[in-house]
Amino acid sequence: MKQSMSASCCHPAFVVRHPLADSRMRLVTAVLIGAVGLAGATEYHVSKSGSDSNSGSLSQPFLTIQKAATVMQPGDVCTVQAGTYREEVIPPRGGISESQRITYRAAEGETVYWKGSDPFTNWTMHGGNTYQVNIPNAVFGAFNPYTVFVKEAWMGYGAGRFHRGQVFYEGEQYREQRTLADVMATPGTWYVKQDKGSTVIYANFGGANPNAGLAEVTMRKSVFRPIIDGGVNYITLRGFHLSHGAPNWSPPSPKTSDQEGLITTYRGTHWIIENNIISDSRTVGIVSGSLQNNNGGTYDTRGHHIVRGNIIRNCGQSGICGRTGWDA
């Protein structure tokens, strides 16, 4: 199920292709094919059977994408093997030119899921078809999407009504309700409350046992975003299934709050986001905007992104948006 919130500044596109992509296709393709062959460049590997104490080679892969992000330098490539990776990656740096990008890519022919959710198998019966799970608030760390709402000064319908977290069962996005009684009466819905230092989530699974299936709860704000506003440039993201983020509603002006999405470029320049499936962000799939009250930068130092060949779906606000970050 999809919960929609209107946004006049954004484009709810399902397949997004940058208008300059064709003119740059030959150049970008040549650069990417030759990236690993650059002098001094390294290809790092990530696998579910790896360890972050490994070297990151094909025979000794890392376990997390974040570990690769931490060590990669301009020109390097991170190749991620098949599996599900549940992490919010904060890249400390980007590349420095078209020929020295930092590239994150799914291994050729392999399916890589990159999610901001975690699975839970300790649901207990509450009554009827409704189960509950108690998550200690300490598990969330600094950000708990069930204590904050989708809310922003520009927002109209729905402001302050919905939490930024979400619940999924077997890939289906459940719909948040305002009361527990509504959840108990309606399959495919959920409700949350805070109780004695824990986040308690109730969900109606319509007769299914969530402990026997895949019940996922959003735990992270995004899956990929810098923490600095501008300067993380020449990044490539290719071939992933990215989903389950909890960003806030993205305003048409960064004067009132941060602009953020499941994937956020902030005011970086020359990113390539291609051939991904991007879905189930609470608000926006891809945002190229800025942090609150930051409109700095020039045409040469921000934007110029290429977004092509992606499928973007089931995002509550829009597929792609942003202000001060495109300029392309």
Image (cartoon, rainbow, N blue to C red):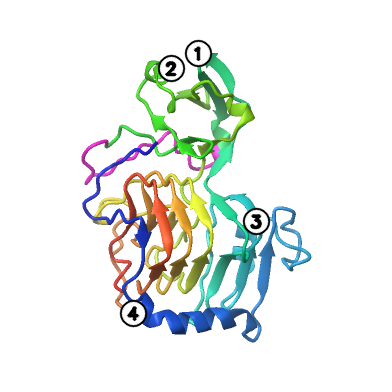
Labelled pair 4, 3 in contact (Cβ < 8 Å)? no
Mark toward the start of the polypeptide (4 vs 3): 3
Q: Is label 4 in a helix, a strand or a loop?
A: loop
- The amino acid on which the numbered mark 3 sits, given as a three-letter code, is Ala
- The question of residue 138 being in magenta is answered with no
Quadrant hosting residue 50: bottom right
Count neighbours of disc 1 (C-alpha within 10 A) and say few if under 14, some if 14 to 19, many if 20 or more.
Answer: few
Report the Cα–Cα distance between label 4 and label 3: 37 Å
Image position, residue 325 (x, y; %)? 33, 66
- The amino acid on which the numbered mark 1 sits, given as a three-letter code, is Gly
Nearer to the camera, 318 or 325: 318
Q: Which mark is residue 128?
A: 1
Q: Is residue 100 visible?
A: no
Between disc 4 and disc 3, the foreground one is 3
- Residue indicated by mark 3: 82
> Going 39% across and 63% down the picture, which residue do you hit?
266
Q: Which residues are magenta?
A: 140-158
Labelled pair 4, 1 in contact (Cβ < 8 Å)? no
> Going 56% across and 66% down the picture, which residue do you hit?
104
- Residue indicated by mark 4: 300
Report the Cα–Cα distance between label 3 and label 2: 37 Å
Q: Is residue 189 above or below residue 315?
A: above
